[in-house]
Amino acid sequence: MDRLQCMKVLVKVADAGSFADAARQLHISPPVVTRAVAFLEEVTGARLFLRSTRSVKLTAQGRHYVEDCRRILSDIDEAEASAGGSYATPSGMLTVTAPVLFGQYYVMPIVTAFLALHPAVTGRVLLFDRIVNLVEEGIDVAVRIGRLPDSSYNATKVGTVRRVVCGAPSYFERNGVPQTPADLVGHTIIANTGSSARLDWHFGLEGKFSPALHPRLFCNSVEASISAASSGWGLARALSYQVAKPIAEDRLRIILEDFEEEPLPIHVVHPEGRHVSAKTRAFVDFAVEQLRFR
């Protein structure tokens, strides 16, 4: 069987979550879809889908293989577009990743605005609070917060964010306002972490000072810790953009600003290669212009 055509079928099944729906969308028969997937499972020696009477789900090996297929098919589309003289026109699948809240607040509006300008581009946004490998996961552009390790990626700095300590006005009325980081020891602390280990909040431009804090509440979600702080329960630490709205609404107030660490840079990142696709080049230029702030 034609391997590239089988890859297209596989990706469509993964997107549709159904062999029958994939067949309808591709205008082929369900047995052809079944044979294509079976052929790729035989070639790879891996089971790509878990099938039941009600659902079709990718296996772990299947997820990795589908992402590889997406990247291969995208590269072929770009090569054909380049040979045909249409390489300068943004088209195809554009995959963008960013931290969860930053992606929701800032990146999603940029992606949708970009798609409105370029109808031949289809968008896919992956929001993770972890660093992902752009090449291995088939990602075109990433927005990253923090200092970048040495890599072969192209990176454009678009701004900075701060780590801030904040609490609700009602909390400070009851408990007073800490004047130095050492004063935090006597306050109710909300930790944004999945563990119950001792918390280190570093202060100073070199991040050398860290009071020994023992949180009363541990949250594995930034939104949950911000919500608890906004209710007046305790003090939380977050990135400045994460608390911009409750700060503007005076539901939270920032303290200890004179003791903050050096701000963290924000970069728009994309892999280097023999060529950069028109969609990636156009989106990076668009995103950099929209994201330059602070």
Image (cartoon, rainbow, N blue to C red):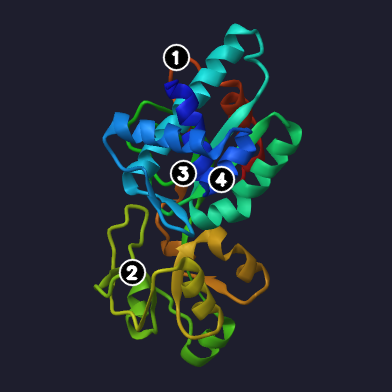
Say whether marks 3 and 1 touch (CB < 8 Å).
Answer: no
Q: Amino acid at mark 3?
A: Arg
Measured from the top left, where is residue 171 in percent x and y? 52, 86
Q: Residues within 10 Å of mark 4 (few under 14, many from 20)?
A: some
The crowd level at tag 3 (other Cα within 10 Å; few <14, some 14-19, many 20+) is: many
Mark 1 / mark 4, whichever is N-terminal: 4
Taking the image as shown, residue 123 lies to the left or right of residue 142, namely right
Q: Amino acid at mark 4?
A: Ala
Q: Earlier in the sequence, mark 3 or mark 4?
A: 4
Question: Between marks 3 and 4, how big is the CA–CA gap?
Answer: 39 Å
Q: Which mark is residue 194?
A: 2
| Residue drawn at point x = 45 percent, y = 38 percent | 34
| Dot 2 or dot 3, earlier in sequence | 3
Q: CA distance from mark 2 to mark 3?
A: 21 Å
Numbered disc in front, either 1 or 4: 4
Q: Identify the amino acid type marked 2.
A: Gly
Q: Secondary structure at mark 3?
A: strand
Res 293 → quadrant:
top right
Residue closest to the eye, 140 or 160: 140
- Residue 196: horizontal and vertical position, in percent? 27, 75
Residue 213 place in picture, x, y as percent:
29, 76
Q: Which residue is mark 3?
A: 144
Q: Residue furthest bottom?
A: 174
Residue 274 shows which numbered tag? 1
For mark 1, give the secondary structure.
loop
Question: Which of the image's four quarters has the N terminus?
Answer: top left
Q: Amino acid at mark 1?
A: Arg
Residue 206 in the image, given as x and y percentages of width and height: 32, 52
Which tag, 2 or 1, sits closer to the chain's start? 2
- Which mark, residue 11? none
- The Cα–Cα distance between marks 2 and 4, rounded to whole angstroms, is 41 Å
Mark 2 and mark 1 residues within 8 Å of each other at the beta carbon: no
